[in-house]
Amino acid sequence: MHDVMFITGTRKGIGRFLVDHYLERGYRVHGCSRGEMEDPPDGYTHHVADVTDGAAMHRALTGTARSEGSLDILVNNAGIASMNHALLTPASTVREVFSTNVFGLVQTSIDAAKIMTQHKWGRIVNFATVATPLRLEGESAYAASKAAVVSYTEILARELATFGITVNAVGPTPVATDLIRGVPAEKLSALLSRQAIPRLGEPADVANVIDFFIADASAFVTGQTVYLGGVV
Amino acid sequence: MRDRVQVLVREAVNDLNDELEYDGLRDPTEETVIFDGSAGVDSLSLVSLIVSLEAACEAEFGVEVSLADERAMSRHRSPFRTVGSLIELILERLEANA
């Protein structure tokens, strides 16, 4: 049974939902965020680690593998957004977005994959966004960082295939979480109207795609990005 | 220290041999060629060996060692060429992290 899962960014939003979702399904769930988790559920192990801190993430991932005997699944959920006109987005903000969404994800994936290669089995699931294929104005830094994630996913999938590790990405539509709290209502409805199914996503919509990617039966599925809401 | 590293490398090379069902590196000596163009293992097997040695070093010595960084990859004489050069690389990295 491949049931040891590590989820980044579990303190709130989709990450928090995924913790409960996979605990209910019998997974041994570890996760991390920058701070302590309020009211962590029974059976879940929280690590205080920022994905941009390579040493802390290394400790969290190897610690998980040591205590559980393996590390089977990594869900790179942690991410930050920045929504503003490109001319009003300073380079420091772009750097910060890339630091978490790209460099943090890359380092975490490498560390986890090195553990997974020892067991010749692994699943890595990354988070993309519909903002990339929709070329959403006002999200240049965020969408570009996630475009990098898609590209990284596709190549990592090829390089890790020989070790029995698949790498895929899920691209959510806006979901009612903190990440979109600052988005004005009219902007949100204009965005939703560009989806085939014009509604906000639910965390369960995201979990459904992850369920598929991590299944034993999905060993032949890798390098894919599945966008929700009918966005292509 | 050298003896312990020697054992780790020998074990990792033997594990790789078992996995590949390839006897080219059986009972390795320090002169045994691991990776040298046409001789030795293929590049993916080298990746596998490096990853398992990094994990073995961390388990044995309690420090994180990175064996395949740019400094190691860009050397004129590859530290991954023979069992002996790989042992030297590991010792060097362990010393730097001590």
Image (cartoon, helix red, strand yellow):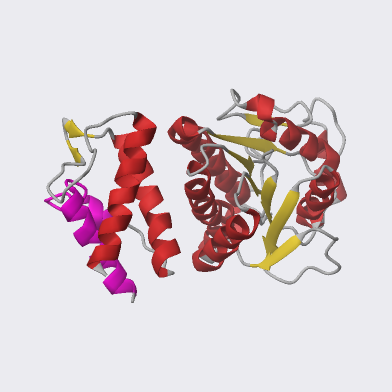
Residue placed at 68% from the left, 25% from the top? A217
Q: Which corner quadrant of the image does residue A227 belong to?
A: top right
Q: What secondary structure is the magenta-colored segment mainly? A: helix
Percent position of residue A107, x then y: 49, 54
Residue A175 occupies quadrant: top right
Left/right of residue A171 with respect to residue B47 in the rendered view: right
User: Which quadrant holds the N terminus of chain A?
Assistant: top right
Can residue B69 be seen here? no
Image position of A148 (left or right of A123):
left
Which residue reaches farthest front? B27
In the depicted view, which residue is nearer to us: A112 or A94? Answer: A112
Which residue does the image show at 51% across and 46% down from the upper left?
A: A113
The magenta stretch is: B69-97
- Look at the picture and state if A228 lies above or below A54: above
| Residue A153 in view of the camera | yes
x, y percentage for residue A187?
Answer: 80, 45
**Which of these two is toward me, A65 or B26?**
B26
**Which x, y percent locates residue A106?**
50, 50
Residue B54 percent coordinates (x, y): 38, 56
* B62 sits to left or right of A33: left
